[in-house]
Image (tube, rainbow, N blue to C red):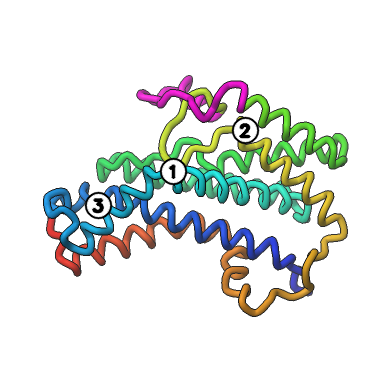
Amino acid sequence: MPEKKRIFELDFLRGLALLAMCFDHFCFDCTLLPDGFPRLLTNNGSSIPGALFQFGNWFFHSTLRQIGHNVFATLFLLLAGIGCTLSHSIFRKAGRTALGAICITAVTGMITLLADLDVLIVFGILHSMTIAFLLYAILSKLRDNRWVYLAAGLLIVAVGIGIQWNEAPVCVVLTWDTVWRIALGTLSYGADWFPIFPTVGIVLVGAFLGKTLYSDRRSLLSDRPYRWARPICVLGRHSLWIYLLHQPLLAGMLFVFCVLFGAGR
């Protein structure tokens, strides 16, 4: 079977968004360092692990992070929507993403219970992407028209703006009722929270872009990736696996680093 032809700029942009995500999550991990190494709070950043904690804490609560997080998350979602239009089996794509979302919730739930760290992901980006892929599949069966995707996407984004999802109160107690509200966007929960309104809409806008820009399934720039872009393209080709595995790898390496550099417990 011939190798599937890739559109290199999409892989590159997806890889770039993944790198930004890894950096963002690394800084979040740094903010949790005192939970495992309490002495970091008393050394005023005089050690390398202490400096990492201070930097992570500054960045994660900075305006720079807030803007960057929104930009790269939006880019990732738009690319996911473009990918819908290039997929030969959208239901298989949705199934893989749904399995990844379930694993993320299960693993973060176990960590929250066993390690007493509040890292549970109730409705993250993979959850919303699964809903978006299924909605795209339904719309494509009813009427495969790019303007339908744009109209549906903008409507969902508008609902998100209307319910003021970005100012939603934080959920204090998880129940079946609050989980639905977290999914819809009227309650927020956790750092990795991407509700249906407006997230699913952004993916559908991406589907419109895919139908508009890549109707012939060819790169807009070059048939082959530029040499300098190849390493980042490799990341973009394996986005789901990187999303699932990057956090335990980053957290594990950070923990080992702190032990080796005498953070103390």
Residue 109 picture location, percent across and down: 37, 41
Question: How many other residues sit within 10 Å of disc 1, few (<14), some (14-19) or many (≥20)?
Answer: few
Which quadrant is home to the C terminus?
bottom left
Farthest front residue in view: 63
Question: How many other residues sit within 10 Å of disc 3, few (<14), some (14-19) or many (≥20)?
Answer: many
Residue at the image point whose x is 39% and y is 39% from the top:
120
Mark 2 or mark 3, earlier in chain: 3
**Mark 1 or 3: the one toward you:** 1
Left-right relation of 255 to 248:
left
Question: Label 1: which residue?
Answer: 63
Q: Amino acid at mark 1?
A: Thr
- The residue tagged with tag 2: helix, strand or loop? helix
Left-right relation of 47 to 253:
left
Q: Amino acid at mark 3?
A: Leu
Residue 257 picture location, percent across and down: 25, 66
Question: What is the CA distance from the residue labelled 2 to the residue labelled 3?
Answer: 32 Å
Residue at the image point whose x is 74% and y is 75% from the top:
224
Residue 161 falls in image quadrant: top right
- Please tell me the numbered disc located at residue 212: none
Mark 1 or mark 3, earlier in chain: 3
Residue 50 picture location, percent across and down: 21, 57
- Please tell me the numbered disc located at residue 33: 3
Q: Which residues are magenta?
A: 161-183
Residue at the image point whose x is 73% and y is 32% from the top:
154
Q: Amino acid at mark 2?
A: Pro
Residue 125 picture location, percent across and down: 55, 43
Please tell me whether residue 163 belongs to the stretch shown in magenta: yes
Question: Label 2: which residue?
Answer: 198
